[in-house]
Amino acid sequence: MSDRTANLLGAVGLAVADRIAAAASEVMKRAGETPAALIVIGYGLGPSNDQLRRILGLSHPGAVRLLDRLVADGLVERRPARDRRAVALFLTEQGHAVRETLLAERLAAIKPLLSPLSAAEEEALAALLSRLLASLPSSDLERCQLCRMCDDRVCTDCPIPASFKT
């Protein structure tokens, strides 16, 4: 592997991450894993606090504080889960609207990076990115962590499908 290629990939990765973080912060006026929490909860599978905290890499108290803020902001609601020992998390109507804006702004922030490419080059890049992604995760939790800011409606043939049931 070329050090130059690895270095270039690292720089592009940071550019993408910085753009996503800035767009999410602009939409939610909050940083950290708050936008990702809204997106993951929005998959609609009713994750528990523990499932969400593992996907986001948070401590239990950190996840509770994050969820308390999302509930107080009217974006998330806690409902009884099938397992009576847990609580299921779902988006409110307002939460769904904010999630839609987050996902749209995320793509809008990334797309300009692709503008120098021709259609054929973009297609080739997509194939290469799919191969790279498919080689990364080894567990469902890792796949969930990688896709925590993804719009699953856009990536219909995801190279690393995750169940979000970790």
Image (spheres, rainbow, N blue to C red):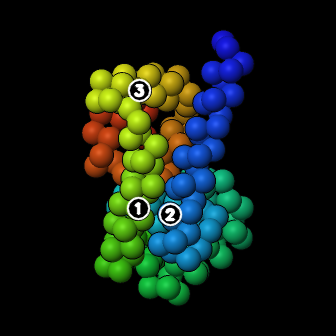
Mark 2: which secondary structure? Answer: helix
**Crowd band around label 2 with a 10 angstrom C-alpha radius: few (<14), some (14–19), many (20+):** many
Point out residue 7 in the picture as x, y percentages from the top left corner.
69, 28
Which residue is denoted by mark 2 in the rendering?
A: 23
Is residue 82 visible in the rendered image? The answer is: no
Point out residue 4 in the picture as x, y percentages from the top left corner.
68, 21
Count of picture labels: 3
**Could you tell me the amino acid type at mark 3?**
Leu
First in sequence: mark 1 vs mark 3: 1
Mark 3: which secondary structure? Answer: helix
**Could you tell me the amino acid type at mark 1?**
Glu
Which residue is denoted by mark 1 in the rendering?
A: 105
Contact check, label 2 and label 1, Cβ < 8 Å = yes
Please give the name of the residue rendered at 52% of the width and 55% of the height, measured from the top-left corner: 20
Q: Which mark is residue 125?
A: 3
Q: Mark 2 to mark 1: distance in Å?
A: 6 Å
Taking the image as shown, residue 156 lies to the left or right of residue 55, namely left
**Could you tell me the amino acid type at mark 2?**
Ala
